[in-house]
Amino acid sequence: MHDFDFLQPASVTEASHMLADLGDQARVMAGGTALMLALRQRMVSPTHVVSVANIRSMRGLTFDPGRGLRIGALVKHSEVARSELVRVHYPVLAAMAAQVANPQVRNQGTLGGNLCYADPSTDPPGCLLAHGAQVVVASTRGERVLSIDEFLVDFYATALAPDELVIEIRVPLLSADASGQYTRFLRTAAEHRPLASVALMTRRNGRHCHEARIVVGASVSVPRRLTRAEAFLAGKTVTTQVAADAADIVAAEISAISDARGSEEFRRDMVRVISRRTIADVFGLATA
Ligand SMILES: Cc1cc2nc3c(=O)[nH]c(=O)nc-3n(C[C@H](O)[C@H](O)[C@H](O)COP(=O)(O)OP(=O)(O)OC[C@H]3O[C@@H](n4cnc5c(N)ncnc54)[C@H](O)[C@@H]3O)c2cc1C
């Protein structure tokens, strides 16, 4: 790893000024779990690392019954998983966070850092998109609020300008009839990162589906809602056959990636399997 200056701004404005002044020579660091690997492997060689870890306004997790959940960008995966507020009001989000990586990464990695790295093999983006979450970004020029799909542009690419920081993630209130599930598939038990994932959030009455939001992650370059599968489920009474048909639509609707961890065909098959099981679980059906 080459030498760099380590800067520790105390506010978002100060950090944004630094980033604007230093341009391409600077990299933001939060928990450092992704950035330190990139530095060690010389994938990036900044002259300055701007640590945002001391910016208090980017910490904390609050729930307002009128507005929903606000998660500071510096909140760690383990805090999301353990938070009583998240567990009570957003159990699918809490369950997802508890499965990220391993205890070391969950205790060090932040939710903001996870989104900013935009690595496709991660858990929070798809789950947050299924919850209709938004990302708040800030710079000396003010704040912008983006939906997750506006924020995540592509494989390792976000809508962040060079002088902007993610400061907060907002998750809207869920309706009383909301329920869902997040399912991840690992290729081997020794792997931490998902090969495929499905996040399903529904509004339902028993097995009758009023509304569904389905997002596939990890097997696609960037998670997106699968609107054909969502439209297929909406208004239906979900049976085992409906769940299987919806899973076929999900598998056909994605543009699966192909890499050393899994071919496009294998990923599509796994997405089909976990989609069918997830839909069946959410609607209380037995699965095979
Ligand atoms: C061994 C291992 C296994 C993993 N397994 C999983 C897994 O199973 N599931 C999963 O979801 N993830 C997994 N991850 C990824 C992990 O979740 C992320 O590395 C972590 O959340 C990143 O957060 P961080 O605070 O450490 O980010 P950092 O490493 O500090 O930063 C990551 C990137 O985001 C930028 N950045 C960070 N914060 C901000 C901000 N607030 N504003 C603007 N830019 C910012 C940095 O410049 C950098 O480019 C794994 C990582 C490792 C190392």
Image: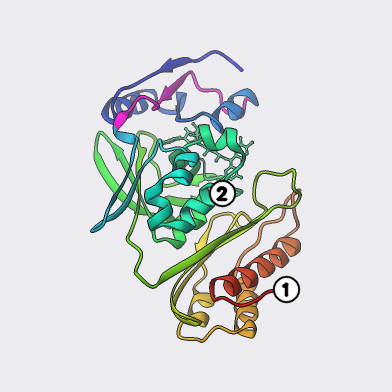
* Pointer 1 local density, CA inside 10 Å: few below 14, some 14–19, many at least 20: few
Q: What residue sits 51% from the left and 48% below the top? A: 97
- Front position in the image: 213 or 89: 89
Circle 1 residue: 288
Which residue occupies the foreground of this view, 113 or 108?
Answer: 108
Disc 1, SS: loop
Magenta segment:
42-56
Q: Position of residue 108 (x, y in %)?
A: 51, 32
Q: Tag 2: Cα neighbours inside 10 Å, few (<14), some, or many (≥20)?
A: some
- Residue 35 drawn at (x, y percent): 54, 30
Q: Which residue is mark 2?
A: 155
Q: Is residue 50 above or below residue 153?
A: above
Q: From the viewer's perspective, is residue 59 above or below residue 195?
A: above
Look at label 1 and name its amino acid: Ala
Q: Which of the colour schemes (rainbow, by chain, secondary structure, one colour) is used?
A: rainbow
Mark 2 C-beta to ligand 1 under 8 Å: no
